Amino acid sequence: MLKHFVQKRKDLTEKELLEINSFCQLLPGATSTQTICILGYKKGGTWLAIITLIIWLLPATLLMSGFSFVYHYIDEKTLHTDIFKFLHPMAIGFLIYATYQSFNHAINNTITRVIGLVALVLGFLFFKTPWVFPVIILAGGLATNFSKKRIPQKETATGNIRWANIWVFLFVFVIAGYLSETARKNDWENRRSFNLFENFYRFGSLVFGGGQVLVPMMYEQFVVREKTQYMEAGELMAGAGMIQAIPGPNFSLAAYTGGIAMRDQGYMKHALGCLIGIVGVFLPGILLVLFFYPVWEHLKKYAVVYRSLEGILSAVVGLMVAAAIYLSKDLFIISDVSLTKVHFLVIITTIYLLTLTRIAAPLITLFCLFLGWWF
C-alpha cells in the first residue's frame, strides 16, 4: 500500500496511510481490508469503498470457497491419502508465531501482563464455554480503564459525534442473535444458515489481533461445542493451513468454514455457506470503519479508546496462547506415537522458518502438503 498508493500514485501521504492503519488497529475486524476500504472511501465515498472492498476480497474468498468444495475430492477420492494431515500442526505453528509477534507489542507493563495471564488461564479452562472469548476480551478493555496514569486525557474532545450511526451495527448484531436462537428453538428448516450468520457476525465483531485469532474462535464454535459440531478438527485446520498459501486477508478462512459447515446439505447450500461466511465475518468491521472514520478526528481525542485497546490486545495474546495449548493438546491426543513426533517437528520447524528465515508462508504450506502425501 505504501509503495503503490503513496509513492507511485500519490493518493495520500505516508503519514495519512499510517494514521489510517492505526485507526483500523483500534477496531475489530480485518485490518488490511478496513484500510483498503478507507482508501476507497477517501477517493470516492461510500460506493467506491464498497466496490474496492469487493474487488479486494474476491481472489482469496473465491479460492477458499473453491477449496471447501474440492477438499474431500483431492484428499480421498483422487490421491487416496491424507495429504492435509500436517496442515493442522503447521497452523498451530503459525498461531504460535503470531502470538510471539504480538507479545512485545501488547504485553509491556504490569497490568497487561496480569490481563494476559488471566486470559490464558481462563481461556484454557473454559475453552468449551460459550461466550468465553468475548467476555475475556471486553473485560480486558474495561480493566485498563481503571487507571488514567499511563494514558491520560490530554485533549478535550469537542464537536458533535453522530453516535446514532453505530445503532445499525448493533441492530444487525441483536437481530442476528435473535433469529439464530429462534431458528434453533423452533427447529426451522434453514436454521443452520441463521446460526452460521450469527456465528460469523459475532466473530467479525469481536476479533482483534488479525486472522489468526479466528482459528481458536472457530475451533471452539464448530469443533468443540456439541450443538454446532459442523466439522472435525482436521477439516478446520486444513483450511487454517491453506489460508497461509494464498494472497489476501486471513479472514477469508470464513468462506471455507462456512462452506464446510453446509456441505452435507447439497451444492447450493454449500455455496450459500461460503457466502454467509464472507458476508458475516467482514460486515461488522466494514460497518464500524465506515461509521467511525468520518468522526475519527473527534474520537482520537478520547484516551479511553487507547486504554481499552491496551487491555483488549493483551487479553487477545493470552487467549492465543491458551488456544495454541488447547489445539496442541487435541492434536497429540488423537495421534499415534509416530505421528505425534512428526506433528511436533512440523510445529517447531514452522516456527523456526517464520522467525529466523525469509521463506514465504505459501512455500511452507506446499512443503507440508508434500509431506502429507509422502509420509
Image: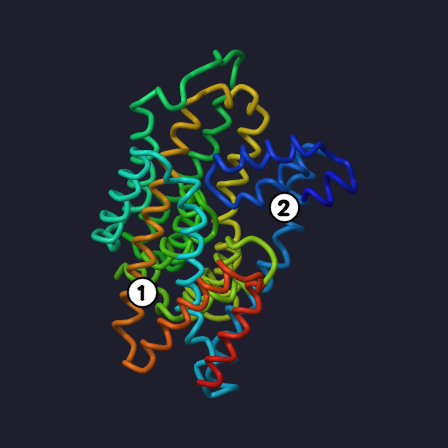
Relative to 125, say whether 303 is above or below: above
Q: Which mark is residue 165?
A: none
Q: Residue furthest left?
A: 125
> What colour scheme was applied to this rendering of the protein?
rainbow
| Viewer-nearest residue: 290 or 132 | 132
Q: Position of residue 261 (x, y in %)?
A: 41, 64
Residue in the image at 33% along x and 29% along y: 144
Relative to 190, say whether 201 is above or below: above
In this picture, residue 158 sits left or right of residue 217? right
| Residue position marked by numbered label 1 in the rendering | 328
Q: Position of residue 127 (x, y in %)?
A: 26, 54
Are there few (<14), some (14-19), or many (20+) residues within 10 Å of tag 1? some
Q: Position of residue 76 (x, y in %)?
A: 46, 83
| Image quadrant containing the N terminus | top right
| Residue position marked by numbered label 2 in the rendering | 53
Relative to 73, say whether 6 is above or below: above
